[in-house]
Amino acid sequence: METQKTVLIIEDEKFLREALVDILRFKKFLTLEAKNGKDGLNIALSKHPELILLDIIMPEMDGVALLKKIREDAWGEKVPVIILTNLSATSEQLTNNADTQNPTQYLIKSDWKLYDIVKKVEEILKAQNTL
Amino acid sequence: MIEQNTILESNNVILSLKILAREKEIVRRKLAVTAVKLAATAKKLAITAKEKESVRRKLAITAKEKESVRRKLAITAKKLAITAAKLAVTAKEKESVRRRLAITASKLAATAEKLAITAKEKESVRRRLAITAAKLAVTAAKLVVTAAKLAATAEKLAVTAEEKESVRRKLAITAEEKEDVRRKLVITAAELAVTAEEKEDVRRKLVITAAKLALAAEEKESVRRKLAITAEEKEDVRRKLVITAEELKVSYKTLEKKVLERTESLEMARAKEEAILLSIGDGIIATDEKGNIIFINKTAEKLLGKKSKEVLGKFFYEAVVLVDKKGAPIQLENHPVKMALLNKPTTAITGAIYYHLRKNKTIFPVVITATPVMLDGKVIGTIKVFRDVTFEREIDKAKTEFVSLASHQLRTPLSTVSWYAEMLLTEDMGHLNKKQKKYLGAVYSSNQRMVELVNALLDVSSLELGTFVIEPEQTDICKLTENVIHEQRPQIDAKKMVFSFSCDEKISLVQADPKLLHMVMQNILSNAVKYTPEGGKIDFSISLTDLPSHKTLKGQNTKNILLKISDTGYGIPKNQQDKIFTKLFRADNVLDKDTDGTGLGLYIVKSIVENSGGKVWFTSSEVEKNKGTTFFVSLPFNEIEKVNVL
């Protein structure tokens, strides 16, 4: 029997966070929540989730800064991160940093169906498992 | 009778007596008149006698007077003789003077010749001549005076002689009347005549001499005049020269004054122009044809934090450093001023790619326009106008931030609606009845449409606000395309389409802006998916071509990357094909079939492709079944220049 995977959702928008949490739980994932970057970083570094869903624009610490911190960590260096954002892909800062920080996926929330995100999560974790 | 006779006789006698008496009276009266006449005649005779006596006495006196006159004449004659002798001497002197004058004149002539030869000596000789001429003039004047005096003396003598002649004539007349006196007088007169003739002779000679002297004097005068004229001419020439010299002096002074005035006004104009240049609100740096800085205005000094003396005469590349965003110096051959020096076609550089280095090592963004200064078809220098665009950059940044914020703020609620609708529609959280499902479906698809519209609008506003900067980087175009396809995959699969993709293996990494390229491909591909019916076919291929279909901004022909996306869709109506790239335009045939569309996608594609130095075109048939539409995008293979999209 597959062990349940823990997914950390770092998202300041309550409805979006709850939607992600609900659907992932429904799909038998364990979830962790953080409503800003600072909390997210603490939880990530302490709980070591299998995957992180990361928003970019957040109070306290934004997604880019958080990702940078995580990647500095020995564990965090390899953890899959899906950046979920509503910023346009054309945002200079985001792409530059996203490139250098080597995220696993970069998705625009409004373009992606919730179930497609779940599928993405499942795909990644499956791939991780097979390694 | 007797008596009567007697009476008659007596009467006759008485009558005769009376007549006789009357005749006697007449005779008597005549006698008396004659007597009176005789008495008058007698008186006249007596007067005549007296007159004769007086005449005789007068003649006697006249004789005496004549004697005295004769003596006086003798004395006068002697004086004349002396005068003549003196005149002779004077004449000799004059002759000698004349000769000397002649000699002097010849010398002068010689001198004049020398003068003619030596121009330099002329002035001094002229002075000497002038002096000599003056002396001659004096001498001549003296001679003239002497001659005039002689002439006067001669005239006086002539007058005296005439008077003597007249006296002589009177005397001759008197002598005729007075026989006695006449003879003596005749002798005297003859003697006098002889004397007078001699005097006349002397006088004539004197007159001749005087005339000759006058002639000589005239000749001298003429010589003198000629000399004087020559001297005058020389003087004239000298005066003219002096006048000319003065005029020249005046002209020179006027000219000098004018030059001074002109110089002043020019100086003023120059100062004004320089002040204008110096005060222009944009930075201006001018170089000579070698690229050495010859001018920098105040704004440029202020912007660069450098004084003009620090940069003047120095090579522009070193004196005013141009760097990129990261502070690395711009290559010399890419430097706008260098381009201007080489007279390469200059483009106003408006991108945020140039920065000037201040003296304090900080940088600021600049907009540079460098143009060659042309003279007779040659580049004689350059003018660089530049502006600190920090403020504009801030505005650009604000615009970008606005777009980011808008995209974030608009998309967040759309995402929420979308996701919750989705969860409900999958019925994972509970069953929905038919109506509920239908209504929710409407909410969901409307929301999806809103998402697309927002995305397109944000892209357009990004394009139009100029926040899109093409930033080429090493891009794996095949992989990028795969990502795009992957994003579209749900829709492709949903419509059960046959999809194929091929990418030329020779294309590995190319210089391209991945974000923009992504946007281009995403738009064309989503159109193909959207406007092709279920079960249709889409082919996507990327290849390298040698099509010389366009040139890069540098004007080199390069290989192109050709994107080809063909579908078996509805096609674009022939009569609307020219409008298909127009903003917000949607073809009639798709309006009927699918209301989901913004009319912005191809407008965005065209904007990006053309500003990247590429081309986009299509072939389409609405009529032929399964022919559909094929879009082509051709992009330069090597480099995409860094320029603002709009």
Image (tube, coloured by chain):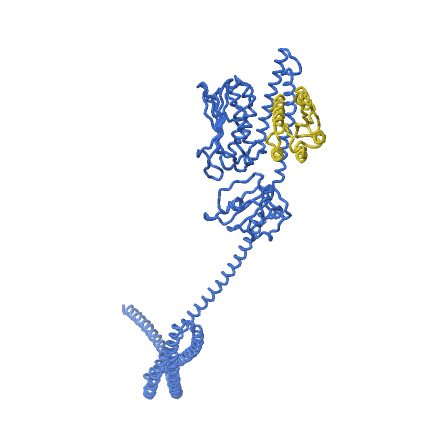
Residue B57 seen in the figure: no
Left or right, B94 with reference to B331: left
Q: Quadrant of the N terminus of chain B?
A: bottom left
Chain B tint in image: blue
List x then y, in percent, for residue B643: 54, 37
Q: At which x and y percent is residue B343?
A: 48, 45
Is residue B284 shown to the viewer in this render?
Answer: yes
Q: Nearer the viewer, residue B450 or B517?
A: B517
Residue B218 to residue A6: above or below: below
Q: Position of residue B314 (x, y in %)?
A: 56, 52
| Residue B324, image x, y percentages | 58, 42
Q: Judge by depth and name the residue closer to the eye, A58 or B579.
A: A58
Q: Nearer the viewer, residue B29 or B471?
A: B471
- How many marks on residues? 0
- The colour with which the image depicts chain A is yellow
**Nearer the observer, B316 or B288:** B316
Lateral position of residue B293 relative to residue B10, left or right? right
Seen at 52% across and 37% down, the residue is B641
Question: Is A50 placed left or right of B49 in the picture?
Answer: right
- B229 relative to B397, above or below: below
Rendered view: B331 above or below B589? below
Image quarter for residue B451? Answer: top right
Question: Which corner quadrant of the image does residue B457 belong to?
Answer: top right
- The quadrant of the picture occupied by the C terminus of chain B is top right
Q: Residue at x 61, y 18 (%)?
A: B444
Q: Quadrant of residue B91?
A: bottom left
